[in-house]
Amino acid sequence: MTVSLPILTLVIPCYNEEEILTDTCSKLTSTLAALIQEQLISSSSTILFVDDGSKDDTWQLIKIEHLANRFVTGIKLAANAGHQRALLAGMLHAKDYSDCVITLDADLQDDISVIRTFVLRYLEGYEIVYGVRNDRTSDTGFKRNTAALFYRVMEMLGIRLISNHADYRLLNRRALTELSRYNESKLFLRGIIPQIGFRSDIVTYERKPRLAGETKYPLKKMLNFAFEGITSFSVAPIRLITVVGFVLFLISMLAAGYAAIQKVFGDPDAGWTSLIISIWLLGGLQLMAIGIIGEYIGTIFAEVKKRPLYTVDSILGQIQARDGTNFTKT
């Protein structure tokens, strides 16, 4: 009996990647060709570039690569939807004709030599395979420390994450189908995918320097990403407000008792300093509490509107699923 080789799709989100796209495409093509040569994947496997509303010539380069390279397909989003939504767009698009997908960034800092290991784990029966960095020596000290703090905080909040895992992962079709049931506006795939469950494994790798260009995740975007992850998966910050309020209530009761004793048995202090400190402390805590609650209200506001996560402008390529269905693109 002939066993069908799995159709693999590499999903690559792109935003202003004209400097590196040609080199990235060449390296990924060589990787796919080698896997096909080994008969580990089907010759129908593809590289799917998702242009996330780039302002440079990224989409033009994708079209050029598509005409010259049988492996290359592409999706152009009508506007910049964000890295997580671009990833989701690519995965859901590939779900109907792929047996498994691997997501990775266009800068190829994620070691593409372990794609073969991903595929081998899939062939062993694993449905989700996570790429995990074995060290962070290529990062600055600030980024290493903030990343460690982020994972520590998420663990304290009870949010299940794979430590030192970004978005380099393999999902099979069943995992992709489950992922498609999550209709969240505030996407945090690093938290959502571990919730899916299924049989999973970890592949470690060494992260490389970026091929060229600048990172698309500056500090402001990373902080926003962290806040979205926390508010999407935990109500612990709101509960913390309750705990802080209760503690302050106890402190105020002790302070009131102390003031009463001073009034009865001694000369009470004017207390202007303590009064001002108390006012500023409580005012700051109240504003912080309002801000935390506001984050959750903002999340609720975004979710209840049920707006589309992204809009597809153009699609390149024609792919046929195993059942013979043609996915015709323009």
Image: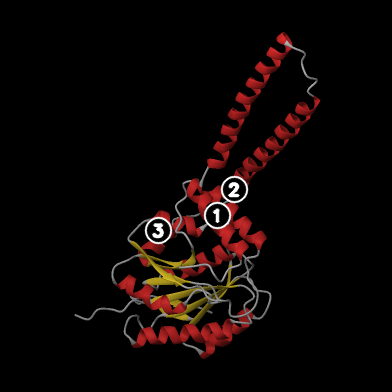
In which quarter of the view is residue 141 placed? bottom right
| SS of the residue under disc 1 | helix
Report the side of 207 relative to 97 (left or right): right
Q: Which mark is residue 150?
A: 1
Question: Disc 3 designates what residue?
Answer: 178
Position of residue 307 measured from the top left corner of the image (x, y, whole percent): 58, 55
Report the side of 43 relative to 185 (left or right): left
Q: Amino acid at mark 1?
A: Phe
Image point 47% across, 73% down: which residue?
A: 206
Rendered view: 238 above or below 149: above
Image point 68% across, 36% down: which residue?
A: 285
Question: Disc 2 designates what residue?
Answer: 299
- CA gap between label 2 and label 1 equals 20 Å
Give the mark, 1 or 3, whose residue is nearer the N terminus. Answer: 1
Position of residue 85 measured from the top left corner of the image (x, y, whole percent): 55, 63
**Most distant residue in the front direction:** 266
